[in-house]
Image: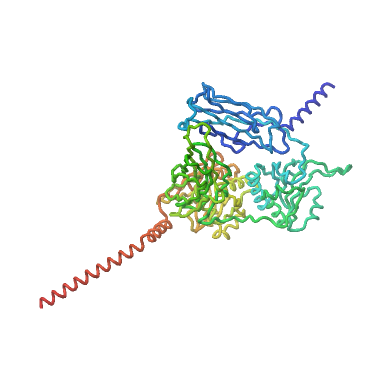
């Protein structure tokens, strides 16, 4: 009897612990850098840790913050304070032996506000005893170490029922596809996986539908046409109530009715994204790519008559991009002395070959008094491009031109304010200066492109966004490969995304390549090396024949032909006519190798390489082009620019030369004629 009681107690504890999950998280898990550094004698940094609606924080949750400080600080007069949910928890001074500060802060449910735990780190650092230390800015710093972590002891609150789609999608963990998914299933699974990660912060796992629906866990999405779900409870009534070409999104119970009670139960519940036919299914899946539709669906089901247009937009050559569209946060910069606002933007937002960029900068600031002074400095990639004093009117509006800047893949614009209050920098209790940038009317404009950048992994987003792009696919439709497409969408959108929306390249079968080869850019994912034979006139520098790899290099008459003992996968960029292509060749159809070929695109993003060779364990990227050799288009462009600037002068000079030559010939002719007459 005692054994039975102990076993029952063990089962109870096991079941209870299954509802509780204790996990250790780094700051990177919440999209913060591994380490951060704040500068200045007084600084503040804020972190938000998200909590789910149906989660409760239990005893044992802790925040571990580890800091290192500047070695020259006055340890007795320097302090760091940590506040949780705007309530100060602890204030400490740096240790004298290791210049470190460590915090261990218990967390509880009452510290969760609006779905987040807010953490503020406030520093007040000093070196000398004087009040004013504005000239020692470089010596003041506080570094949060990568060893900092958050331990969350979470209990899933089963009392919170997700009876609407808007609440259910915040808990979704997986996508289930039919056992033999179509390319359309693959496409929308990849789209939804990518969208949920970027818009809803949900990392969805893609799985294949099991033979028995009873083994599917709750918090899942069933993606496919109704005909794909043979054993779906209530399928007949759903089919009869849904017109053709209409999509359906519905919370659905997978438990079959009890033959005695007639109760269908409450678990498991999935969200069904489906339709009676392909058209209806696509409409339903497209609604899952719109956060506004999902979060306003305060209902257990909805039908979709018209879907979303997923056509890729094409950027204009001279596109204007406002700070608002760049996602710059709306905030007021306030303080005394030096203050700054930094804005990063990718070069890939603009077409290739950007050489001149203008900035229309507009901001409002507190009007200055007669004995106050303020200045604004504008830096582009740490190069000072503009400096001026601010007037008493409280408004700045000017156009700046950047035509001698080496633009990087990621560029940094820094707007620096410098304010001197009445009485100087060291006056006690000075008036604060404050300024706010107008995000709608401050904008970048691409003005000129003086050369054509060669296609590389560092510029491919710029090239590919100028034309619509298709992905051509003939790999197995297994879940791991589908996840790789999601990662490819991530890479494709990483630098070109603005508030206009995401780019969703259409995913087509490989046999449709030939009919689209002259109208669309292409990303080809295949295990068939002969796919390159479709491109008769291209600058693809690698050809493959079974286990033989034929390399060409632009500045060599002869280059290597190599026969590898094992087939090596590759990712190659090349051009065919006026279109760009990425050829991803995965000969053994290994998902790990395919994932490496896609993930390494970002690692090669800052280089001029155009090819990646890889297997499942290693990879290497390099270029087969002569990057210093000007192409025909660049030479013609340079000649056109030269002729535009100096053509009239050349023609005018040529005319003067002709006139002088004619006069000279005429004079010589007259002299000869006179000489002949005199000799007679």
- Between 522 and 271, the one lying in front of the other is 271
Q: Residue at x 64, y 45 (%)?
A: 199
Residue 12 spot, x, y in % from top left: 79, 28
Q: Residue furthest bottom?
A: 680
- The residue shown at (49%, 58%) is 537
- Judging depth in this view, the residue of 413 and 514 nearest the camera is 413
Q: Is residue 165 left or right of residue 411?
A: right
Query: Visible in this render: residue 134?
Result: yes
Quadrant occupied by the N terminus = top right
Give the residue drawn at x 47%, y 25%. Answer: 128
Location of residue 283 in the rendering, given as x and y in whole percent from the top left corner:
70, 55
> How many callouts does the rendering have?
0
Above or below, 135 relative to 363: above
Within the image, what quadrant is residue 116 found in?
top right
Colouring scheme applied when the structure was drawn: rainbow
Q: Is residue 138 above or below residue 668?
A: above
Place of residue 464 in the rendered image (x, y in percent of width and height, measured from the top left): 53, 53
Res. 586 in view: no
Residue extending farthest to the right is 260
**Residue with the most extreme left position:** 679
640 to the left or right of 313: left
Q: Position of residue 568 (x, y in %)?
A: 53, 44
**Location of the C terminus (image quadrant):** bottom left
């Amino acid at each position: 009897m005692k054994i039975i009681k102990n076993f029952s107690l063990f089962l109870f504890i096991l079941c209870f612990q299954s509802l509780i999950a204790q996990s250790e998280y780094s700051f990177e898990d919440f999209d913060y850098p591994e380490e951060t550094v704040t500068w200045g004698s007084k600084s503040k940094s804020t972190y938000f840790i998200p909590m789910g609606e149906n989660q409760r924080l239990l005893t044992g949750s802790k925040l571990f913050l580890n800091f290192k400080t500047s070695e020259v600080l006055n340890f007795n007069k320097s302090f760091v304070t940590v506040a949780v949910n705007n309530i100060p928890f602890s204030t400490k001074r740096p240790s004298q032996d290791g210049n470190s500060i460590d915090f261990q802060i218990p967390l509880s449910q009452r510290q969760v506000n609006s779905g987040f735990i807010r953490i503020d780190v406030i520093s007040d650092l000093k070196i000398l005893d004087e009040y004013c230390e504005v000239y020692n800015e470089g010596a003041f710093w506080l570094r949060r170490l990568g060893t900092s972590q958050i331990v969350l002891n979470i209990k899933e609150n089963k009392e919170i029922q997700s009876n609407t789609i808007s609440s259910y999608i915040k808990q979704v963990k997986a996508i289930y596809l039919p056992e033999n998914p179509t390319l359309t299933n693959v496409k929308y699974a990849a789209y939804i996986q990518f969208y949920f990660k970027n818009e809803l912060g949900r990392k969805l796992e893609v799985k294949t539908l099991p033979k028995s629906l009873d083994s599917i866990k709750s918090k899942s999405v069933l993606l496919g046409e109704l005909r794909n779900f043979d054993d779906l409870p209530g399928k007949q009534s759903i089919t009869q109530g849904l017109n053709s070409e209409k999509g359906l999104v519905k919370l659905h119970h997978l438990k079959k009715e009890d033959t005695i009670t007639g109760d269908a139960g409450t678990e498991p519940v999935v969200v069904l994204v489906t339709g009676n036919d392909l058209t209806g299914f696509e409409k339903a899946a497209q609604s899952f790519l719109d956060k506004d539709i999902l979060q306003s669906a305060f209902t257990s089901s909805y039908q979709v008559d018209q879907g979303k247009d997923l056509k890729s937009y094409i950027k204009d050559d001279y596109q204007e991009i406002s700070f608002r569209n760049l996602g710059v946060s709306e905030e007021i910069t306030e303080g005394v002395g030096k203050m700054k606002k930094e804005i990063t933007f990718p070069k890939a937002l603009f077409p290739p070959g950007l050489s001149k960029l203008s900035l229309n900068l507009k901001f409002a600031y507190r009007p200055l008094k007669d004995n106050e002074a303020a200045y604004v400095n504008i830096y582009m990639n740490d190069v000072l491009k503009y400096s001026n004093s601010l007037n008493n009117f409280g408004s700045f509006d000017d156009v700046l031109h950047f035509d001698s800047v080496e633009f990087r893949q990621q560029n940094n614009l820094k707007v620096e304010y410098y304010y001197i209050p009445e009485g100087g920098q060291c006056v006690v209790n000075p008036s604060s200066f404050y300024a706010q940038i107008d995000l709608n009317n401050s904008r970048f404009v691409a003005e000129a492109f003086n050369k054509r950048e060669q296609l590389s992994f560092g510029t491919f987003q710029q090239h590919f966004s100028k034309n619509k792009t298709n992905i051509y696919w003939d790999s197995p439709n297994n879940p791991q490969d589908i996840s790789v497409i999601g990662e490819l969408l991530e890479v494709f959108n990483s630098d070109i995304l603005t508030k206009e929306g995401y780019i969703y390249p259409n995913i087509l079968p490989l046999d449709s390549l030939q009919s689209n080869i002259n109208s669309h850019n292409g990303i080809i994912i295949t295990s068939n090396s002969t796919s390159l034979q479709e491109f008769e006139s291209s600058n693809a520098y690698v050809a493959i024949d079974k286990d033989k790899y034929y390399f060409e290099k632009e500045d060599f008459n002869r280059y290597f032909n190599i026969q590898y003992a094992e087939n090596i996968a590759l990712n190659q960029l090349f051009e065919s006519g006026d279109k760009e292509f990425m050829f991803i060749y995965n000969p053994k159809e290994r998902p790990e190798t395919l994932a490496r070929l896609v993930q390494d695109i970002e690692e090669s993003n800052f280089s001029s390489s155009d090819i990646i060779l890889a297997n499942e364990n290693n990879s290497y990227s390099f270029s087969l082009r002569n990057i210093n050799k000007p192409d025909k288009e660049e030479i013609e462009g340079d000649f056109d620019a030269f002729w535009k600037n100096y053509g009239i002068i050349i023609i005018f000079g040529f005319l003067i030369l002709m006139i002088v030559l004619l006069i000279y010939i005429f004079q010589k002719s007259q002299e000869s004629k006179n000489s002949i007459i005199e000799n007679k």
